[in-house]
């Protein structure tokens, strides 16, 4: 004999089943939404990764193009240009150049290392002049200059404002003075008085790294490539003379010491021991790759030497901070 299930119990079971179905549907919907969201995120990540790789390749192509332009420059610099036509030779004083590629734009600037101040060879008067032109106080500049000299010389004798091993060993994290030449600009951070802000700059303020080098060939300053701050470090230089040199370089090259003497007049005698004309064989190349329609990009920085139709790397950094770069419309096309 079958026992009848009470009507109320059947309703309760139906209600429980409905609730279970709703919960299962809710869980399934959450899973579907989660999978959909993850798929979307992964798809965007893949696209971003792909674009990042493409920008990286564009930036690296800029290094190759810069080396080619340097070779072209060495061959064609000084070749007469027809009147009314502009030379296609790229400058090596940091002037930005832009060129299009299939899916983007590459921004490149070339900086002749001979236009920088070599911290391994420069006289004290030049180095102090550079520091003061960057706004460093006289007493702080004296400490940095003497400490740089103490760091690179072979002895343990301390200059008046300098520092040797005994000073560095007294620090919280002790180390010894190198007593040898600097191998990189970053090594300056180990020197007494130097700060990251002074070395790298902050905001729109340039840092010391933009004006010094360890790759100079003779320790003199190439007046064709040195920026205004570096010009101001040369004894006898004035803001007016520096501006006239910069203006002259916009349309011509300073090819001989006589050309330079004609620009600076009576100040030439004080400047001549510290300057050179022409150009070197070592260059810093800063390259930024951007996809079409993108404001951000990928930066690469390299130091290369060029000899004949070949070039070689001394330094390569990828990625490189491109926050201070100019926008494409500000660069020469």
Image: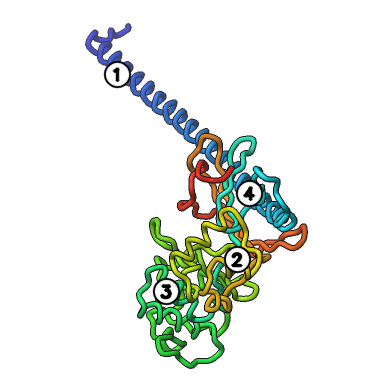
Pointers 1 and 3 in contact (CB under 8 A)?
no
Colouring scheme applied when the structure was drawn: rainbow
Where residue 61 appears, as percent x and y from the top left, is 65, 47
What secondary structure is found at the residue carrying circle 4? helix
In front: label 2 or label 1: 2
Say whether disc 4 or disc 1 marks the residue closer to the N-terminus: 1
Residue sitting at x 39%, y 65%:
197
Report crowding for label 2: few under 14, some 14 to 19, many 20 or more residues within 10 A (C-alpha). many
Between marks 2 and 1, how big is the CA–CA gap? Answer: 80 Å
Report crowding for label 3: few under 14, some 14 to 19, many 20 or more residues within 10 A (C-alpha). some
Relative to 68, residue 226 above or below? below
Where residue 162 appears, as percent x and y from the top left, is 43, 85
Residue that badge 4 annotates: 62
Residue that badge 2 annotates: 113
16 to the left or right of 129 = left
What secondary structure is found at the residue carrying circle 2? helix
- Numbered label attached to residue 16: 1
Which of 29 and 284 lies nearest the eye of the viewer?
Answer: 284
Examine the rendering and report whether any part of residue 310 can be seen.
yes
Residue sitting at x 58%, y 47%:
97
Where residue 190 appears, as percent x and y from the top left, is 46, 76
Between marks 2 and 3, how big is the CA–CA gap? Answer: 22 Å
In front: label 4 or label 1: 4
């Amino acid at each position: 004999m079958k026992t009848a299930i009470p009507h109320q119990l059947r309703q309760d079971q139906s209600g429980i089943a409905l609730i279970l179905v709703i919960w299962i549907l809710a869980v399934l919907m959450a899973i579907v939404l989660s999978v959909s969201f993850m798929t979307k995120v992964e798809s965007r990540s893949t696209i971003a990764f792909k674009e990042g790789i493409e920008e990286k390749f564009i930036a690296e192509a800029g290094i190759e193009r810069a080396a080619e332009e340097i070779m072209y420059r060495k061959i064609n610099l000084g070749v007469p240009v027809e009147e009314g036509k502009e030379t296609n030779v790229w400058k090596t004083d940091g002037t930005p150049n832009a060129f299009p590629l299939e899916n983007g734009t590459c921004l490149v600037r070339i900086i002749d290392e001979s236009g920088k101040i070599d911290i391994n060879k420069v006289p004290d008067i030049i180095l102090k002049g550079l520091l003061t032109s960057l706004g460093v106080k006289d007493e702080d500049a004296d400490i940095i200059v003497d400490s740089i000299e103490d760091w690179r010389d072979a002895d343990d004798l301390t200059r008046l404002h300098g520092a040797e091993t005994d000073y560095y060993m007294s620090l919280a994290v002790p180390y010894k003075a190198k007593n040898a030449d600097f191998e990189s600009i970053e090594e300056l951070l180990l020197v007494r008085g130097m700060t990251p802000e002074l070395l790298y700059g902050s905001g729109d303020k340039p840092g010391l790294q933009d004006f010094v080098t360890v790759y100079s060939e003779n320790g003199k300053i190439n007046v064709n490539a040195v920026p205004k701050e570096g010009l101001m470090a040369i004894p006898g230089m004035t803001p007016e003379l520096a501006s006239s040199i910069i203006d002259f370089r916009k349309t011509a090259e300073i090819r001989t010491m006589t050309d330079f003497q004609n620009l600076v007049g009576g100040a030439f005698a004080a400047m001549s021991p510290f300057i050179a004309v022409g150009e070197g064989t070592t260059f810093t190349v800063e390259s930024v790759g951007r996809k079409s329609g993108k404001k951000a990009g990928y930066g690469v920085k390299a130091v290369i030497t060029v000899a004949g139709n070949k070039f070689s790397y001394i330094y390569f950094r990828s990625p490189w901070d491109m926050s201070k770069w100019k926008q494409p419309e500000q660069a020469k096309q």
